[in-house]
Image (cartoon, grey):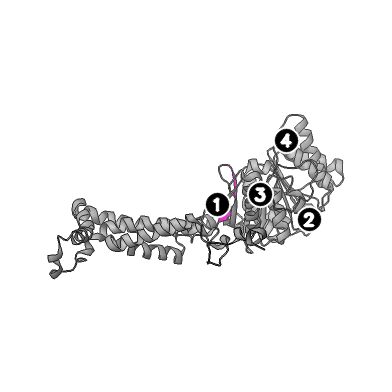
Amino acid sequence: MSTRETGLATSHGPRGSGVPAAALPSRQREYVAALATAAVLAQLALAQVTLLIAVVLAVTGRATRWRPQFLVVPALCGLIWALAAGLRPALAGYLAVPRRLAGLLAGTAWHHQLRPGILAGIGGQVPLALIAGAAEAAGLLWLSRAGRGAMAPWRPGLVAAVRYRLAARALAAGRTVTARGCAIGIVAGTGRRAELSWAQAERAVLVCGPRNASLAEICLPAVCAALRRRKAVLIADLTGTGALSRQARDLAGSLGLTIGELAGRDLPGLTAAAGQLIRRRGAALAPPAPVTVAALAGVLASLRDLGLRADALAWIHGCDRADPGALADLISAGQDAGAGLLLSTASVQAAAGLASVVETAIAAGPIGRELARQLAVALDGPARSPRPGPPDQDLASPFPAVAASRQAAAQALEAQPAGTFAVLTRGQREPPLPGCTPVPLRPVTP
């Protein structure tokens, strides 16, 4: 039987190679490799100092993971050196070796062989070589990261370290108010504040993670900003542990405010008390009962029907213990009435369901693979309404870019270390913020 009949002829490379065609390098790679080899040989002959500087800077950048901005330093040194020596002398020094080599190849400079070698005066290339070498190193670093995909992040620089320390001190002291909303932590890579806007809070924010203490560290700065802005604040800890109540009272005391108890225990009483709280912009702790969610949903629905808006922030901790229907009504009414909602839970099932209906999710690491995949899929598409439900975990999509985005988001969430959190916005309306660090508030009673 011939190879044509078996169809094997198309699965091999050139005759005698014995290598499958898929394993042979593509023509494009061959061209790139040839151009790279030619460029290296040309620089070895004409710009040795430039090549040496570029290699040293590129290796330094890869080893230290410094941001490419550090290349400005050698480039600036070269520019100052060239200006001090004069641009024409600097250019003449840079071209001295290539000119000697060109004369040698042309047969007009053989008598110079008895004099200093052709590489004499190579130090004259240094000023302009610092500029050219820095530019080449930047290109090499960019190509190395673009060709290898996800790599280790850039190492934070001095500016980021100083900014991080200043931001940490400000947040620890309770200065969490920003122009658009509140600061809930710090982005470790840049030292900038991780911000949550009031507009995002009005469309509901899910805060999930395995530890209740981590969830409180993220939500309390938002509560602090709301208290400073004199918003109405309602906190309901459905877990009933009491630790959250103590933290909230200490926080309010440091601001010279008091947090009371929401009067009433049944639905009509809680509804009336919550309405009065919002009207007078007070702050209160709600009873740790699921009926609290229904009462707040009723108040916000009434304001929505009247065309009024509530300048308020409600934090429901342990929302997995609330009735799903009442929780869905609260999310819908809160968005229409302009009330911010923080929904925190340590339950994987509840977080997966709520991810389909909220606008923003904050995941405090480490989280498992199942929840990471569900968050990546749920926040990639439009919000579902009205009832929360677990989304499909399949990361696949007919669009390769969408599938790759989901896969990258899921991997980043799954690899998140303890003590950090990530902020994801539906449809990536805001850039994702992975690797953020919460800053525990240290309230000081005035």
Secondary structure of the residue carrying tag 2 is helix
The residue mark sitting in front, 3 or 4, is: 4
**CB within 8 Å, label 2 to label 4:** no
Mark number for residue 193? 1
Mark 2–mark 1 Cα distance, whole angstroms, equals 30 Å
- Relative to 41, 423 lies left or right: right
Q: Earlier in the sequence, mark 2 or mark 1?
A: 1
Answer whether labels 3 and 4 touch (C-beta < 8 Å).
no
Q: Which quarter of the figure is the C terminus placed in?
A: bottom right
Q: Amino acid at mark 1?
A: Arg
Give the number of callouts: 4
Mark found first going from the N terminus, 2 or 4? 4
Asked if marks 3 and 2 touch (Cβ < 8 Å), the reply is no
Q: Position of residue 116 (x, y in %)?
A: 15, 69
**Residue drawn where x is 17% and y is 61% of the image:** 107
Magenta-highlighted residues: 179-188
Question: Between disc 1 and disc 4, whose residue precedes?
Answer: 1
Question: Considering only order in the chain, which callout, 4 or 3, is on the residue closer to the N terminus?
Answer: 3
Which residue has dot 2 on it? Answer: 349
Q: Residue furthest top?
A: 306
Closer to the observer: label 3 or label 2? 2
CA neighbours of label 1 inside 10 A, class few (<14), some (14 to 19), many (20+) = many
Q: Which mark is residue 336?
A: 4
- Taking the image as shown, residue 446 lies to the left or right of residue 63, namely right
Q: Is residue 276 in sight in this rendering?
A: no
